[in-house]
Image (tube, helix red, strand yellow):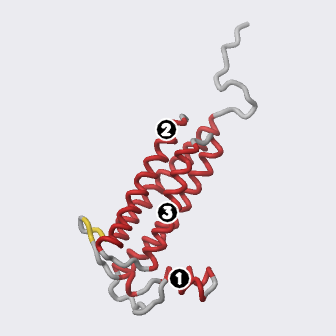
């Protein structure tokens, strides 16, 4: 496993995450779309994922550090994927009865305990079920879900590669290829 390979993968994930974050801020501030609570949760996980991949690309860790960074990237992408999946489900089911009025996330976290606020945020609101922008007939949460699934897959396979390489090495420090023994 080469250091350049892991650094380039982390850098590509960082670049893709930074572009996605830039697009979300562009849609909010230039186009005028107002993000709902699930959109903000996805943005939080995207920020965590981008920061993790950026740190790993700069740091260039060895085997143990790579595993830690890939686990952190996998956790952030699974969390973001769960938020995106919930919003895709809300948008695809027109029969869902959602609360029309929900306070902003600052009001959630200031008046409720963190766990209750997170549960209420994942329940969604009428704003979360509204499709306000599409590209190639996919909504923003669907694009987000595709991105999080791709990064989750990358992180999972890199972790499996690290495990496979660790299992291929002998434990005692001997060479992995023994020389021929001649009598």
Place of residue 23 in the rendered image (x, y in percent of width and height, measured from the top left)? 35, 63
Residue that appears at 67% across and 20% down: 178
Q: Nearer the viewer, residue 176 or 85?
A: 85
Q: Which residue is mark 2?
A: 5
Q: Is residue 121 above or below residue 63?
A: below
Farthest right residue in view: 172
Q: CA distance from mark 3 to mark 1?
A: 18 Å
Crowding at mark 2 (Cα within 10 Å: few <14, some 14-19, many 20+): few
Q: Which residue is mark 1?
A: 106
Mark closest to the chain's N terminus, 3 or 1: 3
Residue that appears at 51% across and 63% down: 78
Place of residue 118 in the rendered image (x, y in percent of width and height, measured from the top left)? 56, 79
Element on which disc 1 rests: helix
Which quarter of the rendering shows the C terminus?
top right
Mark 2 or mark 1, which is nearer to you? 1
Residue that appears at 58% across and 51% down: 69
- The answer to which quarter of the image holds residue 31 is bottom left
| Residues at marks 3 and 1 touching, judged by CB atoms closer than 8 Å | no
Which quarter of the rendering shows the N terminus?
top right
Q: Is residue 47 left or right of residue 96?
A: right
Mark closest to the chain's N terminus, 2 or 1: 2
| Residues at marks 2 and 3 touching, judged by CB atoms closer than 8 Å | no
């Amino acid at each position: 496993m080469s250091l350049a390979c892991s650094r380039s993968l982390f850098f590509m994930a960082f670049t893709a995450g930074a572009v996605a974050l830039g697009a979300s801020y562009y849609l909010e501030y230039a186009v005028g779309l107002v993000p709902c609570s699930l959109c903000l949760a996805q943005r939080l996980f995207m920020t965590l994922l981008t920061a993790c991949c950026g740190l790993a690309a700069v740091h260039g860790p060895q085997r143990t550090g790579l595993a830690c960074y890939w686990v952190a990237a996998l956790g952030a992408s699974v969390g973001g994927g769960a938020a995106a999946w919930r919003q895709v489900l809300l948008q695809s089911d027109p029969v869902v009865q959602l609360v029309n009025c929900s306070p902003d996330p600052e009001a959630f976290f200031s008046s409720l305990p963190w766990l209750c606020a997170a549960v209420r945020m994942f329940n969604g609101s009428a704003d979360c079920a509204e499709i306000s922008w599409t590209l190639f007939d996919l909504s923003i949460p669907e694009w987000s879900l595709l991105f999080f699934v791709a990064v989750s897959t990358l992180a999972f396979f890199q972790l499996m590669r690290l495990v496979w390489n660790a299992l291929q090495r002998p434990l005692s420090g001997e060479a992995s290829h023994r020389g021929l023994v001649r009598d």
